[in-house]
Image (spheres, rainbow, N blue to C red):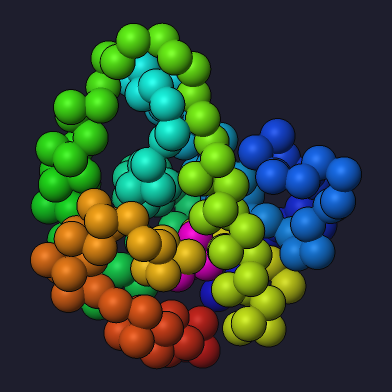
């Protein structure tokens, strides 16, 4: 299951505009990360955007192409609707904050970690599956609590990903 990707596209959320990413981002990963910034602005999340917003945007791709990260989460037994509801409940207090501006620093860390995850797996692309893997290693307490509630771990996610990629 491979997705189309752009090799030398340097998105505005790439943390180091002086250095291009070594791996192309799938169209889905680009859309997810663009959605993160858009949601942070439309929901008026001020300050540092929590990494859980990336997971929320992956879940919102349920009816679109390029949703491998979501497919693997579902293979791990996660209910998209329930997890999406729980994320919204966690984020609700952050909606409508005063306009201090959006800080994508934490999201940049997720992007870099996803890039590393792709390299570790020998993939020449960064997709939504790598974003989820990056989130699984995050020290963010909200993500940790949600992943624990749904029984998703890196050790459970990676074999499911390999299984799905090889079918």
Image vertical order of residue 102 relative to residue 79, above or below: above
| The one of 68 and 130 positioned closer to us in this rendering | 130
In the rendering, at what x and y percent does residue 146 appear? 19, 59
The quadrant in which residue 25 appears is bottom right
Which stretch did the figure color magenta?
A: 129-133
The mark tally for this picture is 0
| The one of 80 and 3 positioned closer to us in this rendering | 80
Q: Main secondary structure of the magenta part?
A: helix
Say whether residue 22 is magenta. no
* Residue at x 49%, y 24% (from the top left corner): 102
Q: Is residue 56 something that shows in the picture? A: yes
Image vertical order of residue 115 relative to residue 104, above or below: below
| The one of 57 and 40 positioned closer to us in this rendering | 40
* Residue at x 57%, y 64% (from the top left corner): 113
| Image quarter (top left, top right, bottom left or bottom right) of the N terminus | bottom right
Image vertical order of residue 47 relative to residue 87, above or below: above
Q: Is residue 83 left or right of residue 18?
A: left
């Amino acid at each position: 299951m491979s997705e189309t990707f752009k090799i030398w596209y340097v998105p505005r959320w790439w943390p180091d505009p002086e250095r291009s990413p070594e791996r192309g981002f799938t169209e889905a990963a680009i859309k997810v990360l663009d959605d993160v910034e858009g949601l942070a602005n439309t929901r008026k999340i001020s300050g540092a955007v929590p990494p859980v917003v990336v997971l929320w945007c992956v879940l919102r791709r349920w009816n679109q192409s390029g949703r491998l990260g979501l497919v693997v989460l579902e293979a791990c037994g996660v209910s998209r609707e329930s997890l999406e509801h729980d994320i919204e409940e966690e984020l609700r207090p952050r909606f409508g904050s005063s306009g201090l501006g959006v800080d994508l620093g934490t999201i940049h860390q997720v992007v870099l970690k996803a890039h590393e995850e792709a390299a570790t797996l020998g993939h020449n692309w960064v997709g939504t599956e790598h974003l989820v893997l990056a989130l699984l290693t995050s020290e963010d307490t909200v993500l940790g609590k949600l992943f624990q509630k749904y029984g998703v771990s890196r050790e459970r996610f990676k074999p499911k990903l390999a299984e799905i990629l090889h079918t």
